[in-house]
Image: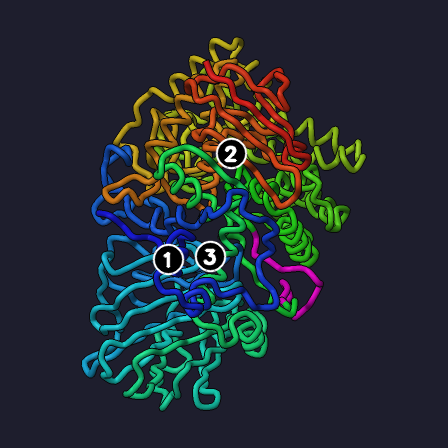
């Protein structure tokens, strides 16, 4: 099937149409200028003239399921949907508050599943983690329309591109177009028949349970209210270009309740503009006025595409196939969708105490640290330092109320993010306060690191002795925690050194060696221990667990995770040859199809690319001076694990707020942050002829690939050969050149 995933984004098309039409009107529609007072901070001009990088963004990639057992690694149980992306195709600007996207099923990650045939509404927040999908709105028409409201649709009449989504609702005969700004969205509904048109505000429904909601009519053609899920309340203000004749409320304020807005029978085109706020209705109204005002959907869309084009142009590639460019720029696009903005255009936000404050910086959600610390957050540090600075300020603000810097899901990976940011020159935040909060994380029980007292006293975290454990057995994930805490200790030690805190530096560096305490030299695996220090027996290194010994992994997948001390890990094997042989087995020992874990999928041997815990392992051959072996694995992943499935729209696993996408970006560029807290990057062979990293300054980093083969021979930095395989972060700041020589 050929998918038209973008529409009218090409400069060539615009120029061609302008010659035919010869009208100023075309340009006023297609090239409208972004007029809101605040917008994403893009600071670059496109390096190549007339290049539209948004043409390579296909938001449908990652929405389709994996169904082939050969790609999955096992036959899924009946009615299982393998987590092959869990992304949304709708409109968003970089790190925006609003993600305006269709929903086909609630409680399904991002809410949109490509194989579904019905749309339930268009929601205004999203992440891809079974939460959000707030403020659902759906245009409906027809005398027979009844609850639950939904409409069939076809992919042949559906389009998506950066900052734009379109679909035709067949049951209601309505064409829907969507676009958005940072804090507001715009809907355009074209009703084919004038048959009792209505607009559904399905406020009793979201991915999370709705506790309460309100909607009131304001004047002739506006509504305002909120939707509340637990502590979180999202306010909205929406206006229409047509009068609202009446409201029909059902189960007002309750879960699964809704409101229908009745509009005039003569209405054929309805434009609904909506502003969001996590502070108040007044701020939602102000956000809408500042960011959209009276602008048309076409103007909002064109402005959004311009913002995305400026951002994507910071990495300009030459060469490569159309599919490779599409995967690259779609992945870069997804890198910048989370964390999400939570402060309003006037700077207001609600802090952890539910107080309205204004501190002069943008306030963001917590990053999805597990596992975006590995690569995605480093890309943000490289391409948008100001964004990272505001994210850190947001983390510190939250930490000031709890005494701990927040984490996400597992580990304490704010440590590598904040330390790495500081070492990369991002310093416009209260580093002393951030450091103290991170020390609290690392030393105090009851905060970000569960079982930290045990970790400090014993040097590892034990798991209980459980007879016949299975995939979903509950434990402490002691091996994973020990390994991750050891790396987090190392990352925090780097910051301690920078701040001249010798005492904590020495202690944390000593603790960073704790990975050795869970390495079994008899089996050469990272292995779970009991409280008395004995190994958990029996032991099957191929069996995956969600939370027993390992977090969403097996022993194979975690036994190479020591990114800060690969030389120390190698020494435990006794020789480079033994370490290399173990790596060979990792990528060759076939996965047992009887070992089924929903989010552990898509294998090369025991290596799992469908989940994050072993994403550094393909690069491990570099540490035995065999980069060509790593390159073979990297190339296989790039070609066979992205844009796969029946429609070519599946990923090999959950994108996890951009980590899977960022792995592609870094590996396709040939620069991977193997240890994200360190300011150096491991060089591999790019899939493109040339890459220019251009951040809006005069300096740019140019990466050239001689394209003779896929086997690395040498690396030249500023025309001089280097020893080893790492290049410094300073090249991104000062500019320069990297030349890749292949055999």
Q: Is residue 451 magenta?
A: no
Q: Quadrant of the C terminus?
A: top left
Q: Which mark is residue 171?
A: none
In magenta, the rendered stretch is 349-366
The image position of residue 350, as x and y in percent, is 62, 67
Q: Residue at x 53, y 30 (%)?
A: 671
* Category of crowding for the residue at label 1, using alpha-carbon neighbours closer than 10 angstroms: few (below 14), some (14–19), many (at least 20): few
Front: mark 2 or 1: 1
- Secondary structure, mark 3, is helix
Q: Which mark is residue 305?
A: 3
N-term mark: 1 or 3: 1
Majority secondary structure of magenta residues: loop
Count numbered badges in the picture: 3
Q: Which mark is residue 8?
A: 1
Query: With 506 as the anchor, is 742 left or right in this view?
Result: left
Q: Residue at x 23, y 73 (%)?
A: 173
Task: Name the residue beneath numbered marker 2.
Answer: 691
> Disc 2, disc 1: CB below 8 Å?
no
Residue 110 at least partly seen:
no
Q: Quadrant of residue 240?
A: bottom left
Estimate the spatial distance between the alpha carbons at disc 2 and disc 1, rounded to whole Å.
26 Å
Estimate the spatial distance between the alpha carbons at disc 1 and disc 3, rounded to whole Å.
10 Å
N-term mark: 2 or 3: 3
* Category of crowding for the residue at label 2, using alpha-carbon neighbours closer than 10 angstroms: few (below 14), some (14–19), many (at least 20): many
- Secondary structure, mark 2, is strand
Residue 356 higher or lower than 252, as above or below: above
Query: With 27 as the anchor, is 344 left or right in this view?
Result: right
> Disc 2, disc 3: CB below 8 Å?
no
Residue 420 at least partly seen:
yes
């Amino acid at each position: 099937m050929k998918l038209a995933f973008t529409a009218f984004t090409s400069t060539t098309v615009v120029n061609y149409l302008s010659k035919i039409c010869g009208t100023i009107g075309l340009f006023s529609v297609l090239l409208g200028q972004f007029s809101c007072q605040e917008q994403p901070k893009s600071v670059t001009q496109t390096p190549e003239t007339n290049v539209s990088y948004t043409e390579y963004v296909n938001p449908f990639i990652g929405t389709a399921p994996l169904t082939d057992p050969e790609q999955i690694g096992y036959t899924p149980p009946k009615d299982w949907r393998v987590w092959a992306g869990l992304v949304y195709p709708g409109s968003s600007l970089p790190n925006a508050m609003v993600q305006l996207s269709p929903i086909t099923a609630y409680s399904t990650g991002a809410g949109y599943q490509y194989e579904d045939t019905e749309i339930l509404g268009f929601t205004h927040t999203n992440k891809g983690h079974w939460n959000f999908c707030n403020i659902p709105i759906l245009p409906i028409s027809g005398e027979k329309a009844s609850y639950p409201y939904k409409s069939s649709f076809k992919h042949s009449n559906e389009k998506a591109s950066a900052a734009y989504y379109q679909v035709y609702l067949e049951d209601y005969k309505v064409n829907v177009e969507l676009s958005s700004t940072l804090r507001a969205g715009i809907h355009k509904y074209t009703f084919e028949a004038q048959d009792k048109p209505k607009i559904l505000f399905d406020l009793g429904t979201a991915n999370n349970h709705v506790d309460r909601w309100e909607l009131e009519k304001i004047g002739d053609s506006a509504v305002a209210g909120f939707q509340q899920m637990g502590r979180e309340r999202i306010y909205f203000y929406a206006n229409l270009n047509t009068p609202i004749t009446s409201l029909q409320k059902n189960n007002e304020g309750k879960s699964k309740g809704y409101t229908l807005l009745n509009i005039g029978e003569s209405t054929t085109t309805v434009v609904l503009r909506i502003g969001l706020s996590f502070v108040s209705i007044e701020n939602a109204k102000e956000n809408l006025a500042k960011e959209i005002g009276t602008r048309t959907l076409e103007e909002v869309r064109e402005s959004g595409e311009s913002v995305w084009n400026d951002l994507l142009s910071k990495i300009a590639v030459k060469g490569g196939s159309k599919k490779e460019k599409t995967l690259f720029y779609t992945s870069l696009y997804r890198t910048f969708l989370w964390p999400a903005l939570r402060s309003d255009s006037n700077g207001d936000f609600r802090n952890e105490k539910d107080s309205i404050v204004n501190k002069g910086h943008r306030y963001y959600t917590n990053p999805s640290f597990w596992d975006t610390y590995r690569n995605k957050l480093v890309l943000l540090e490289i391409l948008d330092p100001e964004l990272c600075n505001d994210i850190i300020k947001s983390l510190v603000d939250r930490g000031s109320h709890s005494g701990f810097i927040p984490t996400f899901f597992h580990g304490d990976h704010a440590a590598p993010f904040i330390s790495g940011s500081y070492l990369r020159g991002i310093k416009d935040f209260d580093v002393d306060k951030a450091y103290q909060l991170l020390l609290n994380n690392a030393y105090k029980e009851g905060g970000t690191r569960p079982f930290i007292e045990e970790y400090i006293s014993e040097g590892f975290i034990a798991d209980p002795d459980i007879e016949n454990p299975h995939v979903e057995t509950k434990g402490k994930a002691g091996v994973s925690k020990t390994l991750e805490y050891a790396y987090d200790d190392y990352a925090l030690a780097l910051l301690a050194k920078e701040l001249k805190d010798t005492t904590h530096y020495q202690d944390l560096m000593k603790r960073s060696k704790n990975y050795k305490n869970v390495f079994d030299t008899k089996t050469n695996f990272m292995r779970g221990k009991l409280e008395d220090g004995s190994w958990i027996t029996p032991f099957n290194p191929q069996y995956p667990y969600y939370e027993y010994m390992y977090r969403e992994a097996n022993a194979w997948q975690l036994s190479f995770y020591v990114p800060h001390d690969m030389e120390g890990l190698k020494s435990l094997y006794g020789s480079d040859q033994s370490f290399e042989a173990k790596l060979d087995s990792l990528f060759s020992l076939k996965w047992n199809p009887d070992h089924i874990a929903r989010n552990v999928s898509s294998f090369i041997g025991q290596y799992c690319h469908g989940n994050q815990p072993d994403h550094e392992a393909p690069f491990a051959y570099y540490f035995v001076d065999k980069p060509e072996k790593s390159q073979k694995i990297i190339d296989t992943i790039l070609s066979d694990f992205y844009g796969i499935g029946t429609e070519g729209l599946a990923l090999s696993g959950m994108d996890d707020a951009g980590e899977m996408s960022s792995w592609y970006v870094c590996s396709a560029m040939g620069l991977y942050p193997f240890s994200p807290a360190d300011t150096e990057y491991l060089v591999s062979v790019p899939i493109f002829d040339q890459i220019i990293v251009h951040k809006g300054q005069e300096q740019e980093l140019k990466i050239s690939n001689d394209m003779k083969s896929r086997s690395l021979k040498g690396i030249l930095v500023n025309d001089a050969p280097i020893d080893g395989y790492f290049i410094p972060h300073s090249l991104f700041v000062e500019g320069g050149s990297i030349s890749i020589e292949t055999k």
